[in-house]
Amino acid sequence: MPASPEPASHKRNERLPRDYESPRLPKLERVAAFVENFPTGPRLRPTVIGSLNDLARTFGHDAPRSRSAHGLRLWFGAGGQHALVIRTGGPGPALGSDFVLGLNALSLAAEPWDFLCLTTLSRLDDYEFRIVASHAREVCARQGRYAEIFDPRNLLSDIER
C-alpha cells in the first residue's frame, strides 16, 4: 500500500515567505473604563485609580458601595492593575444623556483602556438604555476596544441582596 502524503501543515523545513507579516494584535493595557454617576469627584474627567481605596478617596466614601465598585472589585480580583473612572453627573439619578457625555469624555481620554464597563444602566428606561448601549459600542469600535454592557435588570446583584 503506498504511503499517504504528509499534510502540508506537517512538511518539514517549510518556511514562510519573506514578505509574510504575522497578524498584529492590539497590545492590551489591562485597564478597564467605568462610567458611573457618583455624587462627588471630578465630573467628566477620566481618572485613573488603582484600588477601591483610591475610588473612595476620589469619588466619596459611598463610592465603594456602588454597582461600579462591585465591577471594580471583580476587575481588581481578576488581576486588573488600574481602572479609568469617569463620573457622569451629580447626586440625582443618571440620565441617558449623562452616560453619553461620560462616553464622549472617555473617547477623548489620553489614558489607554481596553474594556468598557457600564454597570448602572438598569436605572434607565429601555429607550435610553438602547441609546447609551449603541453609543458605547460606537466608542469602542472607533477606538478598537471591547465593550461589556452590564444590564443588572436580568441579574441579581450582590449589592442589592
Image (spheres, rainbow, N blue to C red):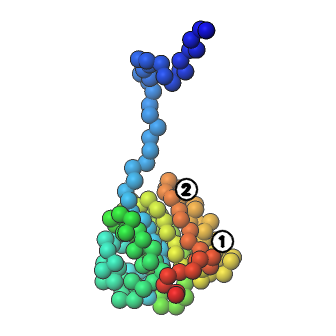
Above or below, comparing residue 47 to residue 111 in the picture:
below
Q: Position of residue 8 (x, y in %)?
A: 53, 21
Residue closer to the observer: 72 or 143: 72
In the image, taking residue 151 as reference, residue 67 lies left or right, namely left
Tell me, for residue 74, which label it has, or none: none
Residue at the location (55% across, 21% down)? Answer: 7
Q: x, y percentage for residue 48?
A: 34, 70
Q: Quadrant of residue 47?
A: bottom left
Q: Say if 63 sits above or below 115 in the image.
A: below
Q: Which residue ends up furthest to the top in the rendered image? A: 2
Q: Is residue 29 visible?
A: yes
Q: Residues within 10 Å of mark 2 (few under 14, many from 20)?
A: few
Across and down, in percent, residue 61 comes to 35, 89
What is the secondary structure assignment of the residue under circle 1? helix
**Which residue extends farthest front?**
1
Note whether residue 37 is visible.
no
The residue at 63%/76% (across/down) is 154
The residue lying toward the viewer, choosing from 75 and 111, is: 75
Q: Which residue is mark 2?
A: 141
Amino acid on which the number 1 mark rests in the picture: Arg
Choose the circle earlier in sequence order: 1 or 2.
1
Give residue 65's quadrant in the image. bottom left
How far apart, in angstroms, are the residues tagged by discs 1 and 2?
Answer: 16 Å
The circle drawn on residue 130 is 1
Would you place residue 24 above or below residue 111 in this image?
A: above
- Expressed as whole percent of the image width and height from the top left, the position of residue 93 reads 55, 88
Left or right of 43 on screen, residue 150: right
